[in-house]
Image: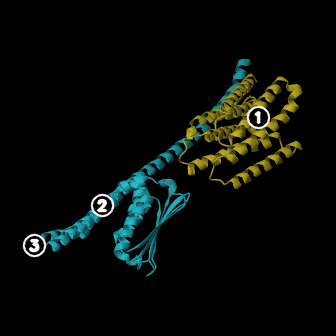
Chain colours: A yellow, B cyan
Amino acid sequence: MLFHKLIIYFGTAIIILAFFVAMYFRKVQKPMYFRWVYLYIIMGIFLSVNTIFFIRFENVYAKTALVLQQVFFLTQFLCGSFIFLYSDVPIIKRKNKIIIIAILIFLYSIGYVLYLIKLAPYRFFMILLSLSFIVYPTFYYKNILIKVYRIQLLKDSLFWIFTGFFFCGCLSLPTYFPIKFAFKSIQFDYNNMASGLLNISLLLVYLFVIKSFLCLKYQD
Amino acid sequence: MPEVSRLSQILPFILVSFILMLFLVSFIVSIIYKYQKRQHTYFTEVEQLKASHENELLKSQIEMQEQTFQNISREIHDNIGQKLTLAKLHLNTLNFNDTGKTESQVNNSIDIITDAINDLSDISRGMNSELILNSGLIKALEFEVAQLQKSGQYQVQLVVSGNAVFLNEDVELVLFRIVQEVINNIIKHAQATNITMQLNYTAVSLQLVVTDNGKGFLQTSYNGSGLHNMKKRTQLLNGTFKIQSPAMQGTTIIIEIPLTENN
């Protein structure tokens, strides 16, 4: 549990650092999608505060924490979708981007409704969140491997943002699947591992977001 | 015991995270590697294309220079040489006993030599790229029009529309040489009396249209290198070269070059 708490506090520090870096670059001319990155960071701060409150006052705050967590995750999902929508990924038309986002929102809503009426577990709609964070970067990677030649990948903000999302999606997705049965034979707390991995995945996004802001130094 | 238990709790977690991270990092590194490899291939191709384009441009400049020498040589041989020979003939046959005739012959010789000097000056100005480099394409074409009108054989018009812009010096020179070649062809083959030159500037392109009312020609039966050279030079400027020449209805040559790449 201590290890788990450490990850949360360290993650909070990283998100706050990302916030300060974002503030430092607030006057630099940026692509349109960065406004959603700002919202993503603010939501990250709320999410962190919510989680810290949860581990401090677990007994009285648990229900509220869970609802707020869903709201923050949903907002982050929307931020990711808008970043994808406004990003320069020409292999997929804007109309198709909207269709993909609409499908994911639709599935997300179904998952949430099913969860509310207790027909599906909480993780069901969280899987969609992770999936979206894998789908969007996949299109971006496909795009850079087919169409783009001129950008310097390691100095491209969008590359780092999508890489952050991709890490987050890939690391968090397994935690929602019922693979804990595989660990039944060895005595170990699967839930703790899953939430630890989830928190690390979220932390990584913000590290990559910081890098994406730093890339603004190289833009023309 | 609690120490061992805690370690057994954390160890699988660290192991799973490490494997997942390793997999993801390898994936991203492979994407970066593939992208950079592709980018390197692309830039190598671009460099090769650029080098080949520069070679073509150089070749074209040498061809233009060669053609200029030929024009000078022809002008000197057919025009100035003839005039100077005639003047020499007049001066050689001077009879100082017949003052009236001598005076007339000397005056004739002076006129012929003056003509020859003017012709030399015109040739020099026509061939000199300084005029284009300093004054721009429009001024150079105006000079060309004035030269043609001076011959008294052609009605020549120059129409400029749109907002004229200065192009790259090399580009203007190539365009001017193409127009000179077109005019030479009209003089030599077209039997035209009317020539119109149009320069249409738009936001993205420059269209150069040269029209004559000559006899036209069948493009299929033409196998000279002049047209081919003009086409090649236009292509060097990433432009298009079109000829419309219906029989006995004159010829129109349309050259269009993009301004963004040549400006």
Q: Amino acid at mark 3?
A: Asn
User: Residue B130 vs residue A35: left or right?
Assistant: left
Residue A71 in the image: state x and y as whole percent: 82, 38
| Residue B227 in sight in this render | no
User: Residue B226 vs residue A165: left or right?
Assistant: left
Tag 2 subunit: B
Q: What is the secondary structure assignment of the residue under circle 1?
A: helix
Q: Nearer the viewer, residue B99 or A172?
A: B99
Question: Is the C-beta separation of discs 3 and 1 under 8 Å?
Answer: no
- Please tell me how crowded label 3 is: few (under 14), some (14-19), or many (20+) other residues with Cα within 10 Å: few
Picture quadrant where residue B184 is located: bottom left
* Residue receiving disc 2: B121
Tag 1 subunit: A
Q: Is residue A132 above or below residue A40?
A: below
> Is disc 1 on the same chain as disc 2?
no
Comes first in the chain, label 2 or label 3: 3
> Is disc 3 on the same chain as disc 2?
yes
Q: Amino acid at mark 1?
A: Met
Q: Nearer the viewer, residue A220 or B90?
A: B90
* Residue receiving disc 3: B97
- Please tell me how crowded label 1 is: few (under 14), some (14-19), or many (20+) other residues with Cα within 10 Å: many
Quadrant into which the N terminus of chain A falls:
top right
* Residue receiving disc 1: A43
Q: Nearer the viewer, residue B169 or A82?
A: B169
Q: Nearer the viewer, residue A77 or B124?
A: B124
| Residue B87 in sight in this render | yes
> Is disc 1 on the same chain as disc 3?
no
Residue A197 in the image: state x and y as whole percent: 71, 32
Gap in Å between the C-alphas at discs 3 and 1? 115 Å
- Please tell me how crowded label 2 is: few (under 14), some (14-19), or many (20+) other residues with Cα within 10 Å: few
